[in-house]
Image (spheres, grey):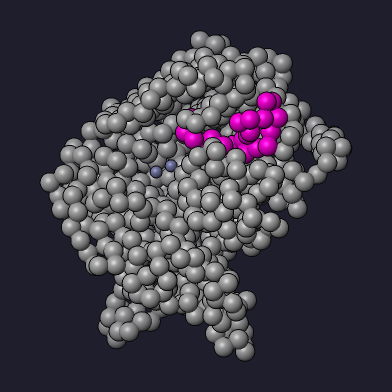
Amino acid sequence: MNRLCPIVVAALAGLLTIAVAPLRAAQDPPRGRIFVLMIWDGLRPDSVTQRDTPNLYRLEREGVRFDRHHSIFPTVTMANAAAMATGTTPEINGLYADSLFWWPVLGQRPGAEKSKTLVTMFGVPAFMESTATLEALNAPDALAGHLLGIDSIAQEVEREGGYIAVLGKQGPTFLFDDRFNTAGAGKDLLGEPHRDYLFASDDAAAPATVASEIMNAMPSSETSGVLDRARDAYFTRLATDRALPAAKQAAGQGRPALIVLWQHNPDITQHMSGLGTAPAIESVAADDDNLGRLRAAVDSDGIADRTDLMVVSDHGFASIRMRVNVAGMLVSAGLKKSLKSTDVVVAPNGGADLVYVSQADFKDDAARHAILQKIVNFAAAQEWCGPIFCRDLAAITSSPRGRRRRIISKPFLGAIDGTFAQAAVGLYNADRSPDLIISFDENPDEDNRHLTGPENPAFAINNNGQQSVPNQSAPLVRPVKGVIYADLSARFTTGMGMHGAAGARELHNYCAAFGPDFRRNYVDLYPTSNADVTPTIVQTLGLLPNIGAGGAAPTGRAMTESLTGGQRYPGAVRTQTMTAQLELQGVQVISTLHMTSLGGESYLDSSSVQRKPLGSSP
Ligand SMILES: [Zn+2]
Ligand SMILES: [Zn+2]
């Protein structure tokens, strides 16, 4: 709604209120509801047990457990924070990953190349988990409020006069309030007033009346064991001591209230120690203590009858088999000029890499097609490579010689042989799609007993081949399934944790909910995803439907089968298998995607890649 003037917005809102009011009267009164969304970053469903997480175990048994919940691919934090905050996939919200190359978008803006700040910050892939970086990106001289292609749930709540608190890990928190302005003195990045809210992340807090007090009391990060444990507890205390009383007041006045609490754990500790290690197990228990404090505060504030509480993770997790330096390998294969060159740019995101090919270096379709096919052939032949997603659909692209359109019977294939089209999995965005998204390979059934623990050998694959490196993971307590290859900084080694790929262990994350709007003792077996979170909040808070600029609307669905008085059977569930094949010298590469769909929404379940010698029997 950010491109409409306030008068038009008010008029639209008025019209919609008239249309929607009778529906509201027929349902349970949703006004004055409080919704608490607690995110345990990187929590896997199999980490939730009566012994390690008694509070979450109780919550999912008393309320709803979503047993077929999905993360959005690439299975990284920022893509899933954007999905949760808006109810959309990257095709609408435009936010693909944690590390993104913005110059193809920003470089087209008049005067962009003269702005030292923009060139320095965004002339190379930028890491998005920083409030300052995100503010610079969404400032008037850059994306001008259009970081996300549609309003976030916090903006929807604010538009209806509600209370918002967004607390926790820097980066994802900003996406819930994506016009947040550190220096705004009560105004957002676009100069609009920002009322009745609380924002606190590791690196920024507001409003000004409490900002310095909050930042001064911020605990420092631990350097071993459960990392960021004190911070997660601190953000929880802000939720119980400041946000819940303010939400109670708003709800008492019949206004909606939303509290988002994003915990660093277990993600940060699983990354650095490895899955199944003592610190990783403790980090999940630390989140559970914070959940216990949150529920106790809801009870003691006397607001349990109007407070819905959802616990969700942004993505799953896996153990690193070895680290792969894709940019370095492309350089030594002669497919990229140098590590810092911009002819081919690789944005590494752990379990997935985004590849951008420069329009200046590859001027026409044929040149771009040729370099992309070479990169795909190079990557697909290697053991670490999973499915690859190409920007363009095969069906609408001319042949390499540019003469004839190819007739394609499989509309999910990409224009480059051996790839899937990004559109097939909700990833195509005309302005922002990378040319390729390369998922690394995940083996969901192998466990980490030979990988995690300092005594295990560790390897990295780079332009010099496979090299031995020290294993930096902690001793293993109990083996955990799911092994991937990963690309990221050198501090990540074999045995540590990672995510980002299109594998089953990363695509299947955790979700449960409890409160007056959710059914009791219910296991939801319908497919659900992080893009369904916001439509469900909209329904429970009784908000008006979201309308984005240019008519963009949430692609996620309200998970009505889990709601009291909701529609019990939301439609037929269908499954689909897609394959893409590529024949290289002596090897056939067969990539497979498994998807589920319900209504108009598709959910990516798993992927696999097989490599077999040409001529071998199937
Ligand atoms: Zn995460
Ligand atoms: Zn992570």
* Side (left or right) of 382 relative to 548: left
Residue 79 in picture, x, y percent from top left: 51, 48
Q: Residue at the spot x=41%, y=74% of the render?
A: 335
Q: Residue at the spot x=35%, y=65% of the render?
A: 328
For the stretch drawn in magenta, the main secondary structure is loop
Q: Is 171 one of the magenta-colored residues?
A: yes
* Side (left or right) of 208 relative to 457: right
Residue 416 in picture, x, y percent from top left: 50, 76
- From this viewpoint, is residue 128 visible? yes
State the quadrant of the N terminus: top right
- From this viewpoint, is residue 559 visible? no
State the quadrant of the C terminus: bottom left
Task: Please tell me in which quadrant of the rendered image residue 467 appears.
Answer: bottom left
Residue 551 in picture, x, y percent from top left: 75, 51
Q: Which residues are magenta?
A: 168-189
Q: In terms of image quarters, where does ligand 2 lie? A: top left
Q: Is 51 one of the magenta-colored residues?
A: no
Q: Residue at the spot x=63%, y=33% of the render?
A: 181
Q: Residue at the spot x=74%, y=29% of the render?
A: 193
Name the residue nearer the viewer: 104 or 172.
Answer: 104
Name the residue nearer the viewer: 136 or 432.
Answer: 136
* Side (left or right) of 456 relative to 312: left
Residue 344 in picture, x, y percent from top left: 47, 68
| The furthest residue to the left | 455
Query: In the rendered view, would you say 213 is above or below 186?
Result: above
Query: In the rendered view, would you say 494 is above or below 240?
Result: below
* Side (left or right) of 447 relative to 5: left
Tag count in the figure? 0
